[in-house]
Image: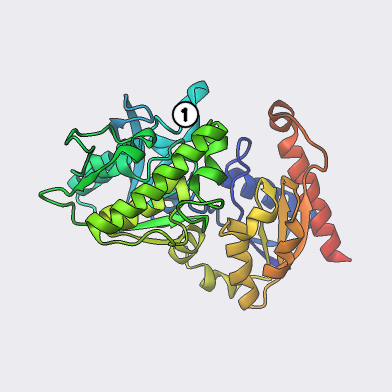
Amino acid sequence: MPRFLLAPDSFKGTLTSAEVCDIIGDAILSVLPKAGITKLPVADGGEGLSYSLYNIVGGEWVEAVVPGVFGLPMTAGYALLSNGTAAIDMSACAGLPLAGDDKDPSETTTRGVGALMQDAVKRGATDIILGLGGSATNDCGMGMAAAIGYRFMDEYGRELDPVGSSMTSVDRILVPKIPVKIDVTAACDVDNPLFGEQGAAYVFAPQKGASDAMVKELDDGLRHMAELIQRDLGVDVSTLPGAGAAGGMGAGVVAFVDGTLRSGIDLVLDAADFDVLLYDTDYVITGEGRMDAQSVRGKVPAGVAKRAAKKGKPVIAINGSLGDGAEEMLQYGITAMYAATDSPKSLEELELTCREDLFNITVTAIMDLQE
């Protein structure tokens, strides 16, 4: 009987990656009752990274009260892994859903992210994996930096609130007297630069509530911050791939905590010993809520497919839907792709039908394998 390794991302808004694994697994067994199935719910640099690592590595799930997207106190959780690493999703306290109907990337902050990092250090974490993605922010990581002791001053020597609208007014960056010393790796699922047409503001700020005028202001601010970071900290983030992730948080991690950027999916796959699991696998199944041209840029299916292809394993992508450019994934090791639905549906409709749709398309995919 064939052996399947299931490594999907979540279907955002409808199914977690663990739920996707369960549905696909049940569908496979309905066709091949004796098939071998290994489930590996994974995530890239977006939401869910910390919980993926928590499930894979083990450890303790902890909570802390930190500033939320608008600076008000909230409770956010993260994982203290058994190997001494803290796994934190910035979306836990700076995520887009937390902004509700008041989305405004010029006034949201990443201060809570820095507070979670401080909490992890106090609890004895030896290093931090920070999941970038799903953020409501565009502050170049100023909020995070302020939480760990940085100060951002205007030309009159006044300290500025660390939010996106303040970036163009920053005249000096003051470093903390006692810097936080901990290794930080940012799990990043995009390679966008900090500013410009492909940068954080122009590509991502509109979905965070920014108007055209605000997008330009934020982009000007990010460009200005890059100049100050170079001048005051001696770090060049102006052309750094991934610097534009999560509203410039990629640049902030590199500049303010001397961190590194790495593919989120590669971090998770390494933690799960994915390459070892491939040895006992005949087929790999991956997927995401919507596969399109963006899927090649560090997303879960691309990361899974690249690794599986190196070992000569066929990869089937079972997705919620297929968008423009999905066929590009065929160049990255995907051997077949399917969509649970081929027509647009509202979130309410998807919530009602997504499980049945996913089950049925998986049955179709497995039946195709038998031909």
| Residue 263 placement (x, y as % from top left) | 48, 61
Residue pointed to by mark 1: 104
The type of residue carrying mark 1 is Asp
| Residue 5 placement (x, y as % from top left) | 62, 62
233 sits left or right of 368 in the view: left
- The answer, for residue 6, to whether it is visible in the render is no
Q: Residue at x 44, y 62 (%)?
A: 239
- Identify the element where label 1 is drawn: loop
219 sits left or right of 312 in the view: left
- Residues 348 and 322: in front is 322
| Residue 218 placement (x, y as % from top left) | 45, 39
- Residues 316 and 364: in front is 316
- Mark 1 surroundings: few (<14), some (14-19) or many (≥20) residues within 10 A: many
Q: Residue at x 44, y 49 (%)?
A: 132
330 sits left or right of 125 in the view: right
- The quarter of the rendered structure image containing the N terminus is bottom right
- The quarter of the rendered structure image containing the C terminus is bottom right
Please tell me in which quadrant of the rendered image residue 145 appears: top left
| Residue 183 placement (x, y as % from top left) | 26, 60
- The answer, for residue 281, to whether it is visible in the render is yes
Q: Residue at x 44, y 51 (%)?
A: 55
302 over 248 or under it: above or below: below
Q: Residue furthest top?
A: 101
- Residues 134 and 26: in front is 134
